[in-house]
Amino acid sequence: MPRLTEIAHSAVRAVLTNGEVAIDATAGNGWDTQFLLECVGRQGHVFAFDIQPQALAATAARIGDVPNVTLLARNHAELRNAIPTKYHGRIGAVMFNLGYWPGSDHAITTTPPSTLAAITAAWELLRDGGILTILAYTGHPGGAEEAAAVEQQLRRLGNNVAMEAIEGQASTKSAPRLWIVRKCPLSATEEQSGTLNYGA
Ligand SMILES: C[S@@+](CC[C@H](N)C(=O)[O-])C[C@H]1O[C@@H](n2cnc3c(N)ncnc32)[C@H](O)[C@@H]1O
């Protein structure tokens, strides 16, 4: 089975097109920011959030001097206000990689209140057909509770949702989980609404 990060990238790559705008809600070391920049190309733009300035410095070091990225040292709960209104409803992809920054204090993690607020805002900002990926880790304190809260929140998104849930290392209790969520045009949702697939 490929790594969940690779599965998330494949799903986003299939949806996000050159020239679009995308959001990395948890920049960390910048792997997802770098990936999103590759997808949107020079004509697109990526907004990347992290509450830890050191993480954004690591992201900046990874991506180098590129003009079409905005690094935001802000809580992703402020996502709606932080993204210019001209992009609302036009975002092609939003990626979350929850938990702690591997290079720092592991006590600084994403938490349900801000994560859930950010997911709600991200969903509103996505275009029809846009994609949201959320990778959650359940092995650290609070991780399993956060993953459960995310799943509940995703079930409440509405009826224009096509969703797949993939669990890594199904034999362990602390398996990471990936949700891949597509925003369907309202007219095309009946068959896909509420689909949850724990197959992988
Ligand atoms: C698992 S790491 C992300 C890894 C990253 N996607 C990469 O490619 O390296 C999670 C990151 O989320 C950040 N974070 C935690 N709470 C946050 C919040 N409320 N808003 C934005 N970032 C947050 C942490 O500082 C940490 O860098």
Image (tube, rainbow, N blue to C red):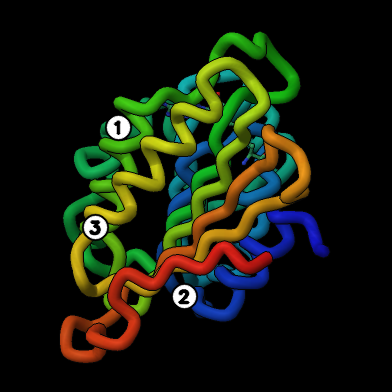
Three-letter residue code for mark 3? Leu
Q: Determine if residue 162 is in view.
A: yes
Question: Does mark 1 have its CB less than 8 Å from ligand 1?
Answer: yes
Say which residue label 3 marks.
157
Q: Secondary structure at mark 1?
A: helix
Between 20 and 16, the residue placed more toward the observer is 16
Q: Quadrant of the N terminus?
A: bottom right
Say which residue label 2 marks.
19
Q: Quadrant of the C terminus?
A: bottom right
At a point 62% along the width and 68% down the height, the residue shown is 199
Is residue 14 shown left or right of residue 77?
A: right
Residue 45 horizontal/vertical position (percent): 46, 60
Is residue 128 shown left or right of residue 163?
A: left
Q: Nearer the viewer, mark 2 or mark 3?
A: 3
Q: Nearer the viewer, mark 1 or mark 2?
A: 1
Sequence-earlier tag: 1 or 3: 1
Separation (CA) of disc 2 from disc 3: 27 Å
